Image (cartoon, grey):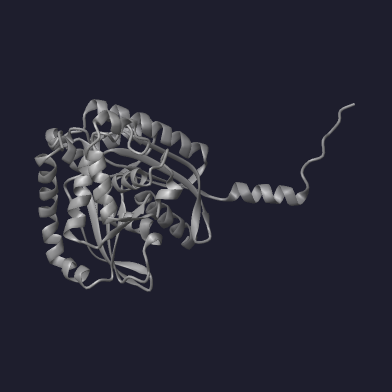
Amino acid sequence: MTTVEPGPRPQARLQGAARRRVPAFAALDLGTNNCRLLVATPLPGGFRVVDAFSRIVRLGEGVGLSGVLSEAAMDRTIDALKVCAAKIRRQSVTRARTVATEACRRAMNGQDFVARTKHATGLDLEIISSGEEARLSLAGCAPLLDASRPWALVFDIGGGSTELSWARLVEGRPVVEGCVSLPLGVVTLGERFPNAVNGAYADMVAEVRELLEPFDADHRISEIVAGGGVQMLGSSGTVTTLAGVHLDLPRYDRNKVDGYLLGFPAIDDVTRRIAGMPVSERERHPCIGRERADLVLAGCAILEAICRRWPVGSVRVADRGVREGILLALMAEAGRA
């Protein structure tokens, strides 16, 4: 005689069906240095991450000198994008946005790479403008802004460029007054100054600071900083790395870094510590690692130039940015639909 096991009770079936119907959204940010993916489901006022991926691919390696994406860099990146595509399929994502930034904007074969990616992975990469990149980064970081301070300077030190947004807070929400994209990031600057010690480091800081001057003059940021009421928020591997080193973490911990307030004296101290490390020691450091060891000082130089130009006194560290901005926008659109 065949024994038939009883099925789940009606309430259990309904709960299971409800869980299966929760839509999943995906956001992929392909930068000059990193390929990052988040898959999440919506929650009231936010979302829950159900899958993620991050890999340093250095897609923009050499672009500043050659003007094109190399075959080796494209191969590395497509391998990472295949992993992302598999995760998106496995999570039954209903809406996704996959964006590429400075490396593809700058490279003469950027569109060819997009077509190659579509053929190899099925992903539709969208090369976004620097303004759109800054807007998405600000949207992703907005929950970390202090509503009691009326002004915010938000920056994202990327691999190929650095985006800055100057925003006024209205009822706690940032309203962008201006944004700029500097054509320097940790990869492009690091390639031009491969031995960033002694005078070379000072030259990097001076070059970045000069690029900040027009943006400062256009919006009179220095005057407002002098009057108080300005906060600074940094979204990048540079600031998260410095926070991790400052906290002496035995391994990188996003929960301890995201939202941490890093004072300018601490930034100076950590920069000196990193500059004094041999590359081999940086490679072994749990919050730097082999893939960032040769780039971290270029990021420190960009950060130092920003801090010198606008002496706010501290930087709120954000381990979030473009992907979170994309997810929030996708979920808002789905809710309106």
Q: Can residue 223 be seen?
A: yes
| Residue 243 shown left or right of residue 70 in the figure | right
Q: Is residue 159 above or below residue 47?
A: above
Residue 323's place in the image compared with 62, above or below, is below
Image coordinates for residue 67, horizontal then vertical, percent: 14, 36
Front residue of 326 and 277:
277
Q: Quadrant of residue 232?
A: bottom left
Q: Nearer the viewer, residue 12 or 241?
A: 241
Q: Is residue 281 left or right of residue 305?
A: right
Q: Position of residue 190 (x, y in %)?
A: 18, 38
In the displayed structure image, the side of residue 91 where residue 69 appears, left or right:
left
- Tell me the residue at 42%/36% (across/down): 84
Q: Quarter holding the N terminus?
A: top right
Q: Would residue 104 be seen by someone viewing this image from the given angle?
A: no
Write the residue at 27% across / 50% down: 267
Residue visible at 84% across and 33% down?
4
Horizontal and vertical percent for residue 62? 18, 32
Q: How many marks?
A: 0
The residue sitting at 59% across, 49% down in the picture is: 21
In this picture, is 162 found above or below 110?
A: below
Q: Residue 90, percent across and down?
A: 51, 36
